[in-house]
Every structure is written in structure tokens, then in C-alpha cells.
Image: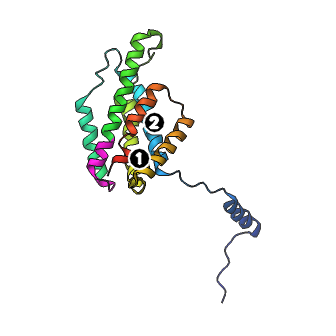
């Protein structure tokens, strides 16, 4: 006995199958690329943090907020299968790099008042949620880079390639390039 035929019209089925077969396969970018791209995004958001804090919006260094972020990172690292100290060390570098951007922008704005931001974004409702959304992604990508990070020469080569690709997509000024160096410095030294 034959199984019942599916109610598909042959031409429609042929079109659907052809469309699936002809759709170009786009592999996911390597984790190192995603990690570097996320670090760039985080540093670009540091400019918004700087704008929010400029002119009395709060100090650049905020130990309570940093502790809150690092405690959260430790918990999320463990959940992602990453050693908490690895996640914390990486994110401490992200925080310090963000402060490089903030200090640099504040100095630039004090020296050149015409460049000062016209608007002050709200840290709690506009900027921090976007920063916080990057954290789990970065931890997941950090975990996925473990095999590459086991070989320092391979790690440094992949990191340089990923950084070059990210900078080609998102041109950075000298301040942001310097901060990106700091943000990525520990990547190949992490366990």
C-alpha cells in the first residue's frame, strides 16, 4: 500500500526546493571576528557614556557600577562554561578601555568646545541596556575562542585578522584604536 500523497503541487514543490538549494550558504563568522566586533561596538558606546557624563553627569570612574558589572560577568561566565576569572579579566580590560575613550573625549571636548555633544543620553535607560546586551554575546564568543586561544601564535594571528576586518568595517580614530588595543590585550593570554 502506498502512503498518502502530500497535497503539494509539483511545480510549487520544485520552486521551493530549488530556492532552498540555490540560497547561498553564509557560514557564521569566526568567533574571534565576533568578539572583536563586539569590543568595537562597546567602545563606540563608551562615547555615549562619555557624553552622558560630560559636564556634571557623573565621574568617569564608577567603582560601584564596575563591581556590579564584574559580579554579573562572573555569574554569566560560569553559566556560559567559562571560568569566572577569565570573564572578569576580559571585562575588566573592556571597562578600562572604555575609560580611555571617556577620558580622551572629555579632554577633546574641554579643548574644543565646538565638538561637545549637543545631547546627553540617559545612562540608565539608553546606554547601559545596550552595553549590558553585549555582555552575554561577548562571553559566549570568548568561550568559543578557547580552542584558538590555546595556541598563542594562532591566537595573535587570528586576533590581528579580526581586528583588521573590524577596522575596515568601522573606521576608528586614534583614540578608539588605542582603546581597542587595551580591550583586546588580554585575549590571547586568557586561560
Above or below residue 32? Residue 127 is above
Q: Position of residue 90 (x, y in %)?
A: 33, 43
Circle 2 packing at 10 Å, graded few (<14), some (14-19), many (20+), is some
* Residue that badge 1 annotates: 137
In the displayed structure image, the side of residue 19 where residue 159 appears, left or right: left
The N terminus is located in which quarter? Answer: bottom right
Q: Position of residue 135 (x, y in %)?
A: 37, 43
Quadrant housing residue 170: top right
Q: Position of residue 134 (x, y in %)?
A: 40, 41
Q: Earlier in the sequence, mark 1 or mark 2?
A: 2
Q: How far, Cα to Cα, is label 1 from label 2?
A: 12 Å
Above or below residue 113? Residue 58 is below
Quadrant housing residue 165: top right
On residue 78, which mark appears? none
The residue at 42%/30% (across/down) is 178
Above or below residue 34? Residue 177 is above
Where are the magenta residues, as a range? 78-90
Nearer to the camera, 73 or 118? 73
Q: Position of residue 45 (x, y in %)?
A: 42, 31
Residue 136 painted magenta: no
The residue at 31%/46% (across/down) is 87
Nearer to the camera, 170 or 190? 190
On residue 41, which mark appears? 2
The residue at 36%/27% (across/down) is 100
Q: Residue furthest right?
A: 11
Amino acid at each position: 500500500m502506498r502512503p498518502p500523497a502530500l497535497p503539494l503541487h509539483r511545480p510549487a514543490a520544485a520552486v521551493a526546493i530549488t530556492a532552498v538549494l540555490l540560497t547561498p550558504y553564509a557560514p557564521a563568522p569566526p568567533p574571534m571576528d565576533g568578539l572583536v566586533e563586539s569590543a568595537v561596538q562597546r567602545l563606540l558606546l563608551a562615547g555615549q557614556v562619555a557624553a552622558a557624563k560630560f559636564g556634571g553627569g557623573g565621574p568617569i570612574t564608577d567603582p560601584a557600577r564596575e563591581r556590579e558589572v564584574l559580579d554579573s560577568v562572573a555569574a554569566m561566565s560560569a553559566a556560559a562554561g567559562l571560568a569566572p576569572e577569565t570573564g572578569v579579566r576580559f571585562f575588566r580590560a573592556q571597562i578600562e578601555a572604555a575609560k580611555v575613550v571617556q577620558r580622551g573625549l572629555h579632554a577633546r571636548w574641554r579643548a574644543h568646545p565646538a565638538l561637545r555633544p549637543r545631547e546627553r543620553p540617559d545612562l540608565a535607560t539608553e546606554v547601559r541596556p545596550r552595553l549590558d546586551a553585549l555582555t552575554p554575546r561577548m562571553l559566549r564568543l570568548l568561550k568559543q575562542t578557547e580552542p584558538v586561544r590555546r595556541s598563542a601564535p594562532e591566537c595573535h594571528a587570528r586576533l590581528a585578522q579580526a581586528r583588521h576586518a573590524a577596522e575596515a568595517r568601522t573606521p576608528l580614530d586614534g583614540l578608539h584604536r588605542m582603546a581597542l588595543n587595551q580591550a583586546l590585550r588580554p585575549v590571547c593570554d586568557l586561560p
